[in-house]
Image: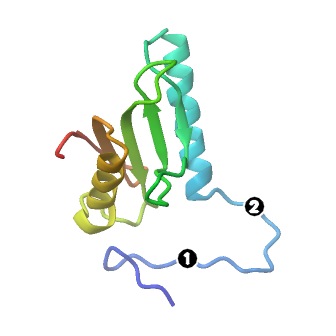
Amino acid sequence: MRKPKIKGKPIKLSSPFDAASSKTERTCVAKIAEWINRIIDDKTLPLGKAEVETKGGDDKYPDIVLFESPHSTDLLLVAEFKRPFFDPYDEAELKEPARKKATKRKAKYFVTSNFQTLIGPFNEF
């Protein structure tokens, strides 16, 4: 049995026989990337697209990367998300992994979130 990241929070395990669908972390991350891209298009911002889970040379998959401009391969932002029961200020589980992924990809900024609180942008490299 998994231990919760925040003490006192129960862990909800779904039944493998349950036919009902539910949203996952990836589903929510994809929805946020979709919103980012819609805002970029609606406001005609000079930014590239937000993409979900792009593999890097470190064999890690940032949840969202945002490119600096429409035709750039340079990253402006790396975003890391954890499920809501994670502490959004957790250095080891959220901030440090996001910082490492951003540093490896030479992104100017990174943010972290547990889908309830957005922390950042940071540029502490």
Left or right of residue 21: residue 123: left
As drawn, 47 above or below 28? above
Residue 31: x, y in percent?
A: 59, 40
- The residue most toward the left is 124
In percent of the image, x 34 and y 79: which residue is there?
Answer: 8
Q: Between 8 and 94, which is closer to the camera in this rendering?
A: 94
In percent of the image, x 31 and y 79: which residue is there?
Answer: 7
Left or right of residue 36: residue 107: left
In percent of the image, x 24 and y 58: which residue is there?
Answer: 89
Secondary structure beneath dot 1 equals loop
Q: Is residue 117 visible?
A: no
In percent of the image, x 40 and y 66: which residue is there?
Answer: 85
- The residue most toward the top is 44
What's the mark number on residue 12? 1
As drawn, 113 above or below 69? below
Asked if marks 2 and 1 touch (Cβ < 8 Å), the reply is no
Residue indicated by mark 2: 21
Amino acid type indicated by mark 2:
Ser
What's the mark number on residue 48? none
- Mark 2 to mark 1: distance in Å? 15 Å
As drawn, 107 above or below 26? above
